[in-house]
Amino acid sequence: MAHGAPSVRELPQRLWPGPSGQGAEEQQHLRSSLAAVQALANVIRPCYGPYGLQKLLVTAKGETVFTGYATAILGALQLQHPAAQLLREAALGQAEHSGDGVAFVVLLAEALLTQAELLLSAGLPRSQLREAYAAAAAETLALLPSLAIRSLGPLEDPSRALYSVMNTHTLSQAGHLARMVAQVCWAAKELDGTFRRERVGVCVLQGGQPEDSCLLPGLAVPGKPCGQVTVVLRGARVAVFACPFGLPSPNAPATARLSSPAELVQFRRESESLLQRQVEQLAHVGVNVAVVCGDVEEKPLAQADKYNIMVIQVKSPRELAGLSEVLGTPVMHHLVAPLEPGKCQRVYGQELREGLAVVFEWDPPTTPALSVVLRGPTRAGLREAEQAVYHGIDAFFQLCQDPRLLPGAGATEMALAKMLSDRGTALEGLRGPVLLAFAQALRSLPATLAENAGLAASRVMADVSAAHQAGYFLAGVGVEGMIDAAGEDVWDTLGAKAHGIQAVADVVLELVTVDEIVMAKETAPGRQDLNPNEKKAKDRRPWPVEILK
């Protein structure tokens, strides 16, 4: 490695005295988890960074998706090994908390486990390895705030910081989207500076071009008014239904048993009468907007027109969930009036070239939501844009919690690696090699950035390492080689980076102490115990288990 900083591979094969063969035995316990984590990291690694590749993902439902987002890939993978499942859980927790850094968690965990295997091979006892790794992780987190060279001011435009999070090589108009997200998040902030992510809605309408994307006041959802009432201009009271606006679905579990044509006629009359009473009940409690996810039949729609009820049909249950949360009314699974309908000022359809959205709008002082309307010719492009917008919203939320920014493009990882290497080289005993192991793992991340950008990784890493050794800790990896991360406005949020490192440390500390995987065996279906006393005795026995080596 450059500039004389030794890696764990360069250490003597036995640094710690112990019984013969102890390192090999403890190393074997880690191999199963390491192999599973490495397999998962190999899937995610080509997607890391703004110049990563995409995956052609076939979901469990048979849907084909082009995506480069680690969150979507991890969510679709069917994992069997508990170590891989544990790492996925931690990475998706990072996405839930910060919206960014999912691939960072997977790749850094894999690199640290690889270094842990080398330390065990060198003779470090596993109990001491866990303690030393915990101390090194704490030291890394303590050093991290010293690299935050910029703090976003309360009146400063956050679009450049959001652009670093949202930019991918497959996303067109990334700058335009970053400015839109910055504008809508800024408008949705409370007077005391707090920000709630649920106040920003995302409406995806296929058609048009990406530059046709726009902002709308209120909450916009893709849908259409179905009847003669197409607008409510004052005092809208909204009910949300996850069912058809009409007779129950033919796939419903209930079955009508009819034995004559007269019974069929009577059944139809009673069904129509029931629908009429349900619509009358909606009008009686003051509902004048009904949002449904299902078919809309003509007769109940005519009844709704009679009572001036606006019926809106949406395609996705996710839109219902968002409306329910913002309006504060439950999603009803039958045409029954809710106890407390949602309230807003206006509801109207908005034509956007080839698309149609329905807007729920409030008066400006009390507006609980604003919407980003995304346009594009393909579903794959819209899916990427939608994911980028959600990443930007999450990043803005993190900046409201902690406005400090770190240099991106791998500069922070290289700076941490340099500081840990300097300390590890100077220390004797246990802590030194472990700090060197952490430094080596951190260097693997900018090296992956260089590889995914199509660069000669060894040459770029030598240049970046030389810059950091000379004290220039803003040196990172760009599309053409080494760049000044601050000069190029490439930033990471301190909160997301710290949370990611902590998540990695938690996973690695758990996995290095695992010696076997014990799985309970499932009982054969249909097997019954005829003797109750024997069954009670069996219940007191340990579960049947299977040990995976």
Image (cartoon, rainbow, N blue to C red):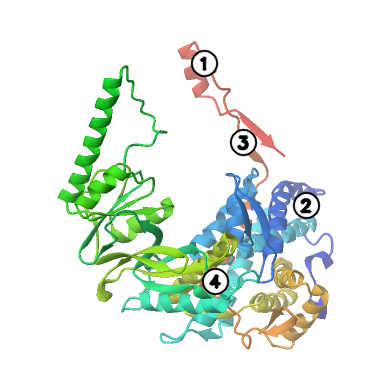
Q: Residue 90 occupies which quadrant of the picture? A: bottom right
Residue 147 located left or right of residue 419: left
- In the image, 166 versus 459, the foreground residue is 166
Q: Which residue in the protein does label 1 denote? A: 528
- Name the residue that disc number 4 marks: 209
Report if the CB atoms under discs 1 and 4 are less than 8 Å apart: no
* Quarter of the figure with residue 38: bottom right
Residue 486: x %, y % from top left: 61, 86
Q: CA distance from mark 3 to mark 1?
A: 22 Å
Q: Residues within 10 Å of mark 1 (few under 14, many from 20)?
A: few
Q: Report the residue marked by disc 3.
A: 519
How far apart, in angstroms, are the residues tagged by discs 3 and 4? 52 Å
Cα gap from disc 4 to disc 2, whole angstroms: 60 Å
Q: Earlier in the sequence, mark 3 or mark 1?
A: 3
Are the two marked residues, 3 and 1, in contact with CB atoms closer than 8 angstroms?
no
Tag 4: amino acid: Gln
Q: Residues within 10 Å of mark 2 (few under 14, many from 20)?
A: many
The residue carrying mark 2 is 23
Q: Which sits in the foreground, 345 or 196?
A: 345
Q: Are marks 3 and 2 in contact (CB under 8 Å)?
A: no
Q: As shown in the figure, which amino acid type bears the numbered disc 3?
A: Met
